[in-house]
Amino acid sequence: MGLVVFATCLLFGAPADEPYPLAEVRFVGNVALEDSYYRARLLEWGYGSLEPLIPKRAAKRLEDHLYRNSYTLARVAAETKDGRVIFHIDEGRLAKIAFFGGGTGRTVQLQLLMSFPKDVFNRRLLNEYQETFRTKLGVRFKYEVVEQEREHKGMQLGTIIDGTTAPRHELHIYLEQSPFDDGWIFHLDINSTDGVLLGLSYGDHALFFKKDEWRLRVDVGANLFRETPTFDSRVGLSRGVMDARWHTPPFWRDRLRTFVWAYGDYLVRQRPLEEIDFYRWVRTGGLINLGFEWKRGQNLAIGVGGELRTVPFLQQPPDAARPISAFSEWRLLSVLQSELIFDVDNPRDDRHHQLEGYAKYFRNAEGKDQWALFWEYQFVHEIGWHDFWVKSRGTALAGDFGIMDEDRVSQHIRALFPLDFSPRIFGVSGEFRYSVWRDIFKLAVFVDSTVYEPTRFGTVIEPVRFATGAGGGVCMLLLDSGQIDVYYGGGWVSDDRWYHAIAMEIRKAY
């Protein structure tokens, strides 16, 4: 008789007033625990068959069982369809684990050590990690599970691979330390002007006082240079940067803070458009600054100091029409700088809606003045997991400036036209990132445009130039912590020159 009932259920479905055979129960969405585990629990609780009104109660019992076993994000729902009971199980998969307050090295180390089977959150396992990190690594942290609800239209790679819906939760780990005490931070930038630029910085606190903070940064770049007049290629040092900052403990309601900044910058450049085969440029200086944070994420700083800039070596063709001499100059410096972050609660450091810039005033020993203005703006609009980016940068020099002070056009137009420099330049960029797999893998298309004034010699003023570039790229989030963006594009400038280049940047995302 049982076989007859079972066959009837298979062909026509179970009648509303008949029990459901346990063999007809299906489990959908579970990844950490297999179907046999859930089926065994139902048998253990006496469900040889499930009556029509029992499935919802069985689902609630399964959910409570998962919660007691530390799967605290688990959700179980039941439905009857075509004579079958289907349990839809979300065991609590995590979209990502994000670490806040740690440097690149520490973040990668903890990311590799902290792993949840099938990315399913388990509170008991997390508590074990918390104790292990405290006793063996000396790392203390707090955590928060954040639910991310996004209305996204379109297929996602993760759904195609395992057939389940996208995870809704993120685990945020907050390391208990000073904002500056984030250890080592790694940065890599590839562009046509500096070549490969590798940056490394280290921060800590309590150097002289309990709440003081400091950071030391070193950048080293290498690029491909062409020898003249043979045009043979060689690899050489293109840039070296050392930057040290020390912040006093905050005072006056924790809104004011003094900081000392010392820096050195070594550049090697070739500028054939200005008839310069090769030159080295060195800047060293120091500033004392007073910073004021009137609102979280929005601050203003004013500083005074001095700077020594030197061109120890400069090589031009023998028949150069515009000879330029090496020089050394000391000048006083005052600066006003500001950073405005309009979405301070955004966990992604690289995706803030922000505006930052500075105004600098220089005066040399001869009493000649120079002004420099720089700004950078970024806005990111999210469309589900897709993004639309708008960026703008600008530089303006006035007074007694030289060609060594000019800004590179490639900084405003995604590595294109590395030989062009300008005293005044304005650039705007638009980029769309199409999400293939949440924020893990995206395809990008971009358009960059700039208007700039060519290098000026004496009273000769050339027409303003317009340059534009377009291309595509790949944007990836590695280990939920490092953002890697790779672009390739081509461009045109209004004096009928064409150029193409690859640009890449690796930076810390959180």
Image (cartoon, rainbow, N blue to C red):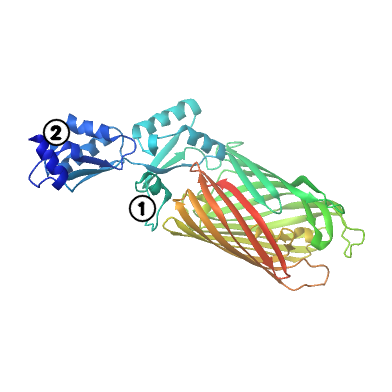
Q: Is residue 158 above or below residue 46?
A: below
Residue 48, labelled with which disc? Answer: 2
Q: Residue furthest top?
A: 136
Specify few, some or many for label 2: CA neighbours under 10 Å numbering under 14, 14-19, or 20 or more. Answer: some
* Residue 387 in sight here: yes
Residue 215 vs residue 43, the one in the foreground: 43
Which mark's residue is nearer the viewer, 2 or 1? Answer: 2
Determine whether the residue tagged by mark 2 lies in a helix, strand or loop. Answer: loop
Relative image position of residue 338 (x, y in whole percent): 59, 58
Q: Quadrant of residue 385?
A: bottom left
Residue 149, labelled with which disc? Answer: 1
Q: Residue at x 13, y 36 (%)?
A: 49
Q: Amino acid at mark 1?
A: Glu
Q: Residue 243 vs residue 148: left or right? A: right
Residue 497 vs residue 482, the one in the foreground: 497
Q: Residue 153 vs residue 280: left or right? A: left
Q: Residue at x 81, y 59 (%)?
A: 272
Q: Residue at x 14, y 43 (%)?
A: 9
Relative image position of residue 235 (x, y in whole percent): 77, 45
